[in-house]
Image: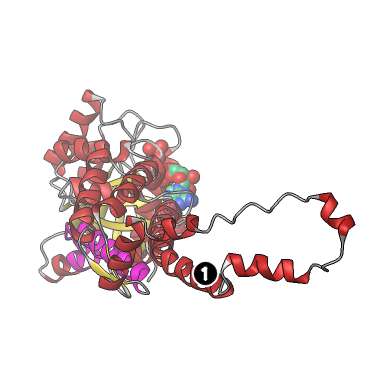
Amino acid sequence: MFEGLKKKFSDFVDGLSKKEKKESELQQQPEAEKAEEKREESQRIEPEEKLQETEEEKKPESAPHEEKRAEPKPEPKPKVEKKEKQKGPDVTLGTKIKGVFLGKVRISERDADPFLEQLRVALLETDVNYDVAERLTLKLHDNLVGKEVGTRDIQKEVRNEIRSSLMQTLTKNSGVDILQRAKEKKQKSEGPFKILFLGPNGAGKTTTIAKIAHMLKTSGISCVISASDTFRAAAIEQSAIHAKRLGVDVIKGTYGADPASIAFDAVAYAKAHGLDAVLIDSAGRQETNKSLIEELKKMVRVNKPDLCIFIGEGIAGNSLLEQVKQFDQAAKLDGVILTKLDVDAKGGNTLSILSDTTVPVLYFGMGEKYTDLMPYSPQFVVDNIVPN
Ligand SMILES: Nc1nc2c(ncn2[C@@H]2O[C@H](COP(=O)(O)OP(=O)(O)OP(=O)(O)O)[C@@H](O)[C@H]2O)c(=O)[nH]1
Ligand SMILES: [Mg+2]
């Protein structure tokens, strides 16, 4: 889960830390060179003339045949070359820096910017919307640049900074507790708790309704499913099969019938039978289809649901944010349930929704079983993306 984001953030932290390591090694390099110089110098105790003298001393005095050879004199050693290198301005500067920040690293703009740029690209690649990626990296820039951290703690510090920035985004929109709200309404005997589920085609609306029905039933909240997708072939039967398996009631109409009226009947049925909740299905629709969006508005007008919940695919990529915005405009959303996070969801669009809308994320769909519904937890998301 969130593997895409997790990998990108971990690459980012590792990259920054490796760079700091490399730079601190570079700062240490002049010292090492100095030591090497000293070592070489100590081996050069004898002046060159003396060395040559010694060579000559070694030569036997009577060796005319050798003299005749007239060997060329060895070139003088280029002694000064290394000393010049040692005196370069970089060495002095490096040593100074090392002295000042011994054991500490101040994250500079020069350090952070290339990595933040990489991070921005990484966020885009993991389905985070452009503006959101921009905001997140700017925030990290402000929090990281100028920060002084121990060289040993750099990974931890950067990690913590990213974690806290993510946490701020992930906790921005506070959500409703479906079960709690249903229980409250039941206690007040205010009639059935009505939830309308809406969203694009195939996102997992009907399956999620079944999961919610299971959750409510096991918590003592009785419910009826309104099979209000009268458009897609076999949609009514699909709701009926889930209802039968779960042991809950279902209200069906005929294909082509007005979905708002089926939901109306389901609410009347719940009232008549003292049921606590009505879960209203709807046909999948694209946010760009005006007439279907109008139909949705009618469902809301007629049935006045307590909650309108958008069901979206975690794997839908960047388009998910726009879908949430459009559906929110049509039917003021109370929450989002993201499905199929067990498949290959990169996870970035969760950040986008929370950052760019006021709609909270309520649950994650984690599979096809009725129990595969996980309450949204910002801590869980952060731990998955940037492990401690
Ligand atoms: N892996 C996985 N599959 C899911 C999840 N939720 C739903 N599905 C599957 O996604 C497919 C579509 O699910 P539906 O519940 O029919 O989706 P829908 O939004 O009602 O579809 P339409 O009514 O056609 O718009 C089914 O095969 C489900 O089993 C989930 O969290 N994980
Ligand atoms: Mg459906």
Q: Name which residue type carries label 1.
A: Glu
Chain part drawn in magenta:
153-182
Q: Say whether mark 1 is within 8 Å of ligand 1.
A: no
Report if residue 215 lies within the magenta region: no
Residue at 67 percent across and 68 percent down: it is 53
Q: Residue furthest right?
A: 65
The quarter of the picture where residue 382 lies is bottom left
Count of picture labels: 1
Decide: few, some or many residues near mark 1? Use Cα within 10 Å; few <14, some 14-19, many ≥20: few
The quarter of the picture where residue 316 lies is top left
Report if residue 157 lies within the magenta region: yes
List x then y, in percent, for residue 269: 24, 52
List x then y, in percent, for residue 251: 32, 47
Reading the image, the residue beneath label 1 is 36
List x then y, in percent, for residue 109: 24, 52
Secondary structure that dominates the magenta span: helix
List x then y, in percent, for residue 14: 43, 60
71 displayed left or right of 338: right
Q: Relative to 366, is 160 above or below?
A: below
The C terminus: image quadrant: bottom left
Q: Is residue 363 visible?
A: yes
Which SS class for mark 1? helix
346 displayed left or right of 362: right
Residue at 27 percent across and 71 percent down: it is 101
